[in-house]
Image (cartoon, rainbow, N blue to C red):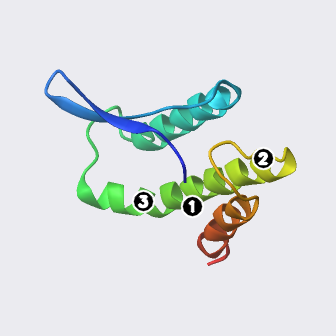
């Protein structure tokens, strides 16, 4: 996927920052809210142990690929060619998500 990302170090923590176009910010914030709910779900806001992370990892992976498919579906529907030279690149991006959503 074409995206601009970079590292941010703050308060002894390292974060990955991703550029998000204006039209996609609501989806990003919504995705972060869902991720926060999954991370805190049933945990009482404590750090998750390894078994809890492993149980939730499959759901997070499916969510990630659903967002990926949604992103490329939108690009195809709106004929968005930003950052690419050929419409086929959007089709490839959508096809990349299929095996992860149908397994």
Residue that appears at 61% across and 32% down = 30
Residue under label 1, please give it: 62
Residue that appears at 51% across and 43% down = 3
Q: Secondary structure at mark 3?
A: helix
* Image quarter hosting the C terminus: bottom right
Q: Secondary structure at mark 2?
A: helix
Residue under label 3, please give it: 57
Q: Secondary structure at mark 1?
A: helix
Residue under label 2, please give it: 74
Q: Is residue 76 above or below residue 46?
A: below
Closest to the observer: 68 or 35? 68
Q: Is residue 55 above or below residue 64?
A: below
Q: Residue furthest left?
A: 12
Q: Is residue 35 above or below residue 72?
A: above
Residue that appears at 67% across and 61% down = 89
* Image quarter hosting the N terminus: bottom right
Gap in Å between the C-alphas at discs 3 and 1? 9 Å
Closest to the observer: 18 or 4? 4
Gap in Å between the C-alphas at discs 2 and 3? 26 Å
Within-10-Å neighbours for mark 3: few <14, some 14–19, many 20+: some
């Amino acid at each position: 996927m074409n995206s601009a990302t970079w590292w941010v170090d703050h308060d002894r923590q390292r974060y990955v920052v991703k550029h998000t176009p204006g039209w996609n910010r609501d989806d990003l914030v919504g995705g972060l809210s869902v991720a926060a709910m999954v991370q805190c779900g049933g945990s009482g806001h404590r750090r998750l142990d390894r078994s809890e992370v492993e149980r939730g990892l499959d759901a997070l992976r499916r969510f990630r690929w659903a967002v990926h498919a949604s992103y490329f579906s939108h690009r195809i529907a709106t004929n968005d060619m930003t950052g690419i030279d050929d419409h086929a690149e959007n089709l490839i991006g959508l096809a990349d998500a299929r095996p992860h959503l149908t397994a």
